[in-house]
Image (cartoon, rainbow, N blue to C red):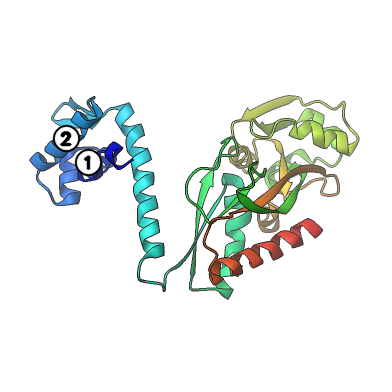
Amino acid sequence: MRSKLPPLNALRVFEVAARAGSYSAAARELNLTHGAISRHIAILEEWLGQPLFAREGQSMAASPHARAFAREISAAFDHIADAAERYGRDHRVKVIRVSASATVAMRWLIPRLPRFAERHPDVDVRVSTAMSTEPALRGSFDLAIRRYVPPGGQFQSWPLFRERMTVIASPALLERTGLSRVEELAAATWLTSETRPGDWEAWLDAAGHAALRAHRMLRFDHFFVTLQAVVDGLGFGIGPLPTLDADCASGRVCMPFPELTSNGATYHALVPLDADKPVHMRDFVDWLRANGDEETDG
């Protein structure tokens, strides 16, 4: 395996050059000469058997292929740096890496993290996001939050919470339309997401209005985009609780029919079986279980 690795010095120079946008910017960041940057890139291009940069005017620019390669390399360097910090001599650094789908990370987990920080101020919880459409668990993490449990028995898992879906809207839109009955939704614009197909159909069926149809339907690729469209008053959406609890409590979004809900996805917490489980990790798991249990019971 080691024989298949490119020259690491050249790889590091390449990552900086691609990220910085030019040889000159990379030279300044790495405190090297322009010629040294050029030689390292040439070594890597020879090893790979193809060019990575092309001249554009007075500077060298990374090709689209090289930029994609650089993103992979950058993630690998981040992983190495994280591992060095976690397994180095400075045991005062207590880090927990959490991977969660973007909406759950932004709307459910992060608003609750201050509670954990109050109890454990010496623990650094680092959250990375993934799209719910990604079929595999990627990257390095201590705990993941997903809608599914991967097969193979590689994770300890437990249900964190089950979504309850209901209609959501901006306060301004509700005031403007004066909507008070489900039937009045037929004259409105409905917002939905490609990552949550059938959200409106499931809610209408649960609400006893399966035949109701929208005057206009707008579809977005991800729910966090749909949520922003709801907040901006573009139309009515179907939103998940408890994920949007903080948004509802702050008045950012409203629920015109809070008593009418349909069942959504169940989110699971996943901990790799081979992961280290120091005391601060066990504390986080206990805290997460308690928060999840509250949501499930509610």
- Of 284 and 200, which appears nearest the observer? 284
Question: Can you say which quadrant of the picture contains the N terminus?
Answer: top left
Q: Could you say which quadrant of the image residue 82 lies in? A: bottom left
- The residue singled out by tag 1 in the image is 7
Q: Residues within 10 Å of mark 2 (few under 14, many from 20)?
A: some
Q: Could you say which quadrant of the image residue 56 lies in? A: top left
- Is residue 10 toward the left or the right of residue 254 in the image? left
Q: Amino acid at mark 2?
A: Ile
Up/down of 99 relative to 214, above or below: below
- The residue singled out by tag 2 in the image is 43
Question: Which residue shows up at 59% across the image and 41% down it?
Answer: 224
- Of 4 and 213, which appears nearest the observer? 4
Q: Residues within 10 Å of mark 1 (few under 14, many from 20)?
A: few
Question: Which residue shows up at 82% across the image and 49% down it?
Answer: 258
Can residue 203 be seen here? The reply is yes
Q: Amino acid at mark 1?
A: Pro
Q: Could you say which quadrant of the image residue 41 lies in? A: top left
Helix, strand or loop at mark 2: helix
Q: Position of residue 196 (x, y in %)?
A: 68, 34
Question: Which residue shows up at 25% across the image and 41% down it?
Answer: 11
Helix, strand or loop at mark 1: loop
Can residue 298 be seen here? The reply is no
Up/down of 169 relative to 285, above or below: above
Q: Position of residue 150 (x, y in %)?
A: 64, 42
Number of residue marks: 2
Q: Position of residue 24 (x, y in %)?
A: 15, 41
- Is residue 248 toward the left or the right of residue 21 in the image? right
Give the distance between the C-alpha atoms of the residues marked 1 and 2, in whole angstroms.
8 Å
Residues under numbered marks 1 and 2 in contact, where contact means CB atoms less than 8 Å apart: yes
Q: Position of residue 161 (x, y in %)?
A: 73, 53
